[in-house]
Image: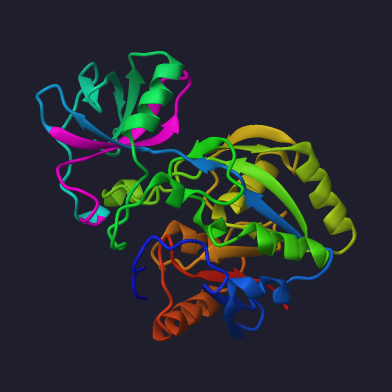
Amino acid sequence: MRPADWPRDASLDERLLVLDPRTGAQTHSTVGALGDFLRAGDLLVVNDAATVPASLTARTAAGAPIELRLAAPGHESTEWQAVLFGEGDWRTRTEHRAPPPNVRVGEVIRVVEALDATVTAVSPESARLVTLRFACDDDTFWQTVYAKGRPVQYAHLRAPLALWHAQTAYAGRPWSVEMPSAGRPLRWSLLAALRAQGVSLARITHAAGLSATGDDALDARLPLPERYEIPAETVDAIARTKRLGGRIVAVGTSVVRALEGCASAHGTLRATAGITALRIDGSTPVRVVDAVLSGMHEPDTSHFALLTAFAPAEHLHAAVREAEARGYLHHEFGDSVLVIAA
């Protein structure tokens, strides 16, 4: 599958591969025709987390340049897990980036020439994964991040991303360190058309995490634990939809992880906020979600593994081969796949 030529604006003409998980049958369509594959009574669940400018330039105590990517908030408002990268820029694929210089607990890193951050922990699994405590209050931290940071960049694009590129139409609270990209092509005009045909809309908030770290051992652990919040009205809408025979269609793997992580932790879906460490694959029992709209993902990714909970791996591999043959765009800002039974 070829990379995207540009961080594309959302377009209803973007391609959509629809996969029937029972038969493996493929239909090639467009995002704008999403309603052709949904029914009145279905419920579309989106992740309304906005994307933060999580990529920050920094220097070690010895003055070595590094890139710091925020990964997840810690127990305090100015404590964060972060992944460190060595020299290089967005034009170099993450897996080819130089490793960062080793840092030690207690070392002070200078971030965006404005903030000091003390290393409070270094993961035993990867020296790239650290915990930092920023020497400022919460307001100063966020003001600096938004003034000096930028969204995580992708080498398969031909131009750098601005922050607005990395937001969905319905983005709310700034929780995600990478874009919940399955929802990128869903314009309000399409969502309104779906509502008009009887498809309902609900939301959750899930802090979509980093998709790659450049360290094979750490990548094998992805996704890292991520926080989520499920409102009572969404729980009620899901219960009502299931009672009336409709389908729960998750927009993105982050929605699947929030709903299934909550149901797994509590035995049932409930209105709550929490953190999920659930890694979903073909062996995971799916309790809530019936279908998923996702980006085009390569077979060695955790996103692809999650899709095997909804369709046999052989059907998904066949869909990937067909998408490659037809020149679908993959990765973030690429085309879409809908796994749904007819």
Q: Which residues are magenta?
A: 65-93
Q: Where in the figure is residue 113, as x and y percent of width and height?
A: 22, 24
Q: Quadrant of residue 72?
A: top left
Residues 340 and 2: in front is 2
Magenta includes 76? yes
Which percent across, then down, holds residue 237?
82, 49
Residue depicted at 37% across the width and 44% down the height = 151
Q: Quadrant of residue 140?
A: top left
| x and y, in percent, of residue 340 in the image | 67, 72
**Figure quadrant of the C terminus:** bottom right
Q: Is residue 234 above or below residue 339?
A: above
Query: Can residue 174 be seen at all in this image of the molecule?
Result: yes
Residue at image point 36% right, 25% down: 144
Q: Is residue 241 left or right of residue 118?
A: right
Tell me the quarter of the image containing the N terminus. bottom left
State the image coordinates of residue 49 (x, y, percent, origin top left). Answer: 56, 42
Choose top left, top right, bottom left or bottom right for residue 265: top right
In the rendered view, tell whether residue 97 sits above or below residue 282.
above
Q: Residue furthest right?
A: 244
Q: Residue at x 52, y 36 (%)?
A: 174
Foreground pick, 27 / 242? 27
